[in-house]
């Protein structure tokens, strides 16, 4: 009997917490990467300019869009968010952020934070996942591939495009959690295997140049944030390497733009991609937020150094509207539960 009472009280308190939570306005922080229409997009990072324009038009009519720094102020000052609040962010710093995203953001006067990987600015390399795409999904040689990764032996007998795609799919997660040095060695070996030049980068896949970052930063709707120096999975790096990535990227962007860099985004940003040590390094480096990539809404009590986000794909409005509406769906509380049970 006592256990039954404890269960009822516990369940009631849980539902009451949900009722209280439902009263709190929350903010959906969205993550984009690219605005373009490439020939291939195996990681589904690209949103077409047309769909991006329609998504922002939808926000203007139905949501309150604020800047990331404004959202951080709500948390710092314990101020409730407005209803149906949205923040736009971009990770990585591809050139199409300037070419296609910026004109649409300025057209709608919608703010966005673009997290730039500082070491790839003016760099003659693509991101490693784009390099992997170039190796296996574009004019791939059909021959056997053998690799040693983290002490483990792997082999792929690549006879056709389907085999090449499988090798790409298999390798991506295996390379993600390697240290940057180990991953670069493997990428170099893969280019040699494929008989391709690592430096034959595609104009459509390059990072921003210094002058282009400056142009973005001069826009009234853009904040530039840090995304490390070279986009490693921080949890796979030593503490010294993590610190260098976090601190040096801030220094490089500050020097380039002559502006304070306040926002930091963890590369990849999943719960396993950074640690409590990483977070403390971000704090100590002088950032006022650390932006992650796991799903949840943000409220005024959220951890500023583990801010969740929702990834946006290349969705038309028929898909995008239901997605956005689902984010603000309230959890059934005590009143809703009693109402439902009374009807049974």
Image: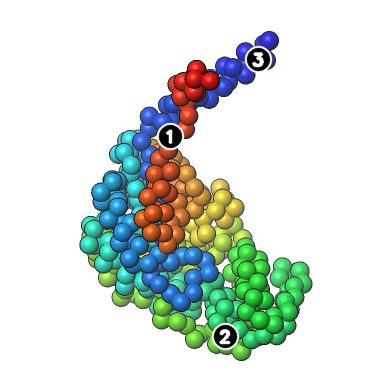
Give the SS element for disc 1. loop
Q: What's the residue at 67%, 76% (across, down)?
A: 163
Front-lying residue, 174 or 158:
158
Residue 223 placement (x, y as % from top left): 31, 59
Q: Quadrant of residue 112?
A: bottom left
**How far apart are labels 2 and 1 at the CA level?**
49 Å
Q: Which mark is residue 139?
A: 2
Q: Is 127 placed above or below 293 here?
A: below
Reading the image, the residue beneath label 3 is 4
Callouts 2 and 3 close, C-beta under 8 Å: no
Q: What's the residue at 66%, 68% (across, down)?
A: 170
Q: Is 67 placed above or below 198 here?
A: above
Q: What's the residue at 31%, 72% (across, down)?
A: 99
Q: Earlier in the sequence, mark 3 or mark 1?
A: 3
Reading the image, the residue beneath label 1 is 330
Front-lying residue, 23 or 330:
330
**How far apart are labels 3 and 1 at the CA level?**
28 Å
Q: Which mark is residue 39?
A: none
Q: Is residue 217 visible?
A: no
Residue 209 placement (x, y as % from top left): 36, 76
**How far apart are labels 2 and 3 at the CA level?**
66 Å
Q: Horizontally, is 233 left or right of 61 in the view?
A: right
Q: Residues within 10 Å of mark 1 (few under 14, many from 20)?
A: few
Give the SS element for disc 3. helix
Q: What's the residue at 46%, 24% (across, down)?
A: 336
Front-lying residue, 247 or 330:
330
Residue 27 placement (x, y as % from top left): 37, 43
């Amino acid at each position: 009997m006592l256990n039954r009472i404890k269960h009822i009280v516990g369940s009631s308190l849980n539902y009451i917490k949900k009722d209280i939570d439902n009263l709190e306005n929350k903010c959906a922080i969205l993550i984009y990467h690219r605005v373009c229409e490439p020939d291939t997009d195996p990681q589904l990072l690209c949103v077409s300019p047309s769909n991006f324009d329609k998504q922002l038009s939808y926000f203007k009519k139905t949501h309150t869009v604020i800047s990331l720094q404004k959202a951080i102020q709500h948390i710092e000052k314990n101020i409730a968010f407005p209803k149906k609040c949205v923040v736009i962010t971009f990770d990585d710093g591809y050139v199409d952020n300037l070419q296609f995203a910026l004109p649409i953001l300025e057209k709608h006067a919608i703010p966005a934070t673009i997290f730039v990987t500082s070491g790839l600015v003016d760099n003659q390399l693509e991101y490693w996942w784009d390099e992997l795409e170039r190796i296996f999904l574009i004019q791939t040689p059909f021959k056997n591939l053998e690799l040693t990764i983290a002490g483990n032996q792997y082999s792929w007998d690549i006879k056709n495009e389907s085999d090449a795609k499988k090798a790409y799919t298999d390798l991506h997660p295996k390379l993600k959690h390697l240290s940057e040095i180990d991953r670069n060695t493997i990428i170099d070996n893969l280019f040699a295997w494929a008989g391709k030049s690592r430096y034959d980068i595609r104009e459509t896949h390059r990072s921003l140049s210094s002058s282009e970052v400056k142009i973005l930063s001069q826009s009234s709707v853009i904040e530039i944030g840090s995304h490390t120096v070279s986009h490693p999975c921080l949890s796979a790096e030593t503490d010294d390497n993590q610190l260098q990535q976090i601190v040096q990227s801030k220094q490089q962007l500050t020097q380039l733009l002559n502006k304070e860099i306040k926002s930091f985004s963890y590369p990849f940003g999943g719960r396993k991609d950074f640690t409590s040590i990483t977070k403390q390094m971000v704090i100590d480096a002088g950032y006022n937020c650390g932006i992650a990539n796991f799903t949840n809404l943000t409220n005024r009590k959220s951890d500023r150094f583990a801010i969740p986000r929702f990834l946006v794909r290349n969705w038309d409005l028929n898909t995008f509207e239901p997605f956005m509406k689902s984010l603000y769906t309230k959890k059934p509380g005590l009143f809703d539960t009693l109402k439902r049970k009374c009807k049974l």
